[in-house]
Amino acid sequence: MLKIALIGAGNLGLHLFEAWCESSEVQLTQWLNRSYSKPSCKGVAVIQEPYALACADAYVLALPDREIASVSSQLPTTGMALHTSGSIPLEELKNQGEKGILYPLQSFSKKQSVAFDRIPIFLESQNKTQQTFLEQLAKSLSSNFFWMDSKQRLQLHIAAIFVNNFTNHLYQIGADLCQKNNIPFSVLLPLIQTTAAKMQKLSPKEAQTGPAQRKEAAIIEKHLEYLDNPQQKELYQKLTMAIQQQYNDEL
Amino acid sequence: MLKIALIGAGNLGLHLFEAWCESSEVQLTQWLNRSYSKPSCKGVAVIQEPYALACADAYVLALPDREIASVSSQLPTTGMALHTSGSIPLEELKNQGEKGILYPLQSFSKKQSVAFDRIPIFLESQNKTQQTFLEQLAKSLSSNFFWMDSKQRLQLHIAAIFVNNFTNHLYQIGADLCQKNNIPFSVLLPLIQTTAAKMQKLSPKEAQTGPAQRKEAAIIEKHLEYLDNPQQKELYQKLTMAIQQQYNDEL
């Protein structure tokens, strides 16, 4: 069994805690958790500070990006430090021992349960001899893992921000327009689901519909006229132009 | 049985044809279809021009917005004209008989089959006496129907463009970044599905995560530095600002 110390109790930390608490392949030894909520797991000691960390096979840092360098510099000198960030290179781990990356590509919310087995996990190591260990750790969460260097992982993280954080903001605008016009947001849910589900069968290019793709100038003008919020109006314009540009480029 | 003539064979027209061809409540009498592809249905005559339309209980116009006025002016003088557009008011129907709206809120692609029974349908009529007829027609597709005036419907259509067309463009940017960096787009699919599925349980505000929401200025700067495409860079900036603005407003 791999002995793992987990560091962090944010959205990702909490879900890793729950997954590894149930795991038969990983023995969670310590959990650095400074939050108020402390779910318990048999055999796992909750600690408050990095100096209280005992030796383990790996220290998994589920921390904000800006804390990775400082916390990793305080780890025990043996065992591998792993961070879970999309945009931070391997070199930002400042521990004296081995370094690696375990980046699960998902948006974690505390209120929403997670099935790790369907989440792709992106791994990076310093050398080939560490790969068996990292694969074993990844498999304790998901068999859907890939090797990727820091440069590719950064681009993947940017892509993820577009399809997740920014998409969620477009849902927010939809919710805002519904609320202002006494329409229940729930009527948009089948459309939101279908838009996402289409990606299983069609490319985004094949799936695109709407006034921008059809270049319906009169309808676009009308929508801009009836959008009161200047920021929403600007996003409508920019996104419409981006869609039209894409279809122009192909002529 | 309601006798319906269907006008149009685009993305929506084709799916309405398929649904009503199978229906026990609607008898499709004629289909105005000028496209090359002509699926057949027993008892349905395919015609090419509005002057060939025979009398029916309703003429359902599944047409581009700009053709609604002109085609509706050529309809037989009896029976109700119905359009299926989000942004066109009822008055733009120029037939001499009754007028109504049947707006199914969904993004239709020819290659993707449609389950109408889960699609919300928004109805509008000129007066109360027409409501029974319109409800009967809507029920032939879905029991999930609502009454809504043209002003609300326009706002709902704008909301739908944000959560569907614009979201699909964000998927396109994700696909583009993956392609440029030799990453299979399929690794983004679980994230796309989860982002949409979260809306069943969380509000967009509760579901928001990421560098913009956490105000991680260093990561945002890094992403902008590594985004080569100026249009993608601008959208990243505008959407990040919009998310930050939302969370600032709540302080």
Image (cartoon, coloured by chain):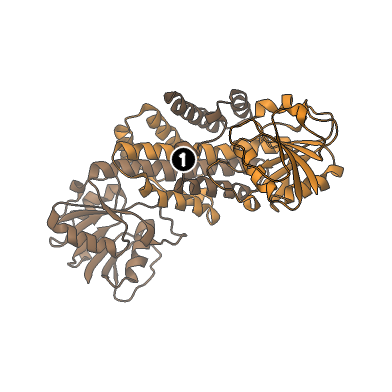
Chain colours: A brown, B orange
Measured from the top left, where is residue A2 in percent x and y?
22, 68
Q: Position of residue A31 (x, y in %)?
A: 29, 66
**Which is nearer the eye, A234 or B180?**
B180
Amino acid marked by disc 1: Ile
Callout 1: chain? B
Query: Compared with residue B172, is residue A188 higher up or lower down, i.e. above or below?
Result: below
For label 1, the residue is B243
Secondary structure beneath label 1? helix
| Residue at (41, 52) in percent of width and height | B190
Residue A232 position in % (x across, y down): 54, 33
In this view, the residue in front, A19 or B238, is A19
Q: How many marks?
A: 1
Q: Is residue A23 left or right of residue B93?
A: left
Residue at image position (53%, 52%) is B199
Residue at the location (54% across, 48% down)? A194
The residue located at (57%, 30%) in the rendering is A211
- The answer to which of A159 and B242 lies nearer the viewer is A159
User: Can residue A213 be seen here?
Assistant: yes
Label 1 packing within 10 angstroms: few (<14), some (14-19), many (20+):
many
Q: Quadrant of residue A75?
A: bottom left
Q: Is residue B217 visible?
A: no
Residue A228 percent location from the top left of the image: 61, 31
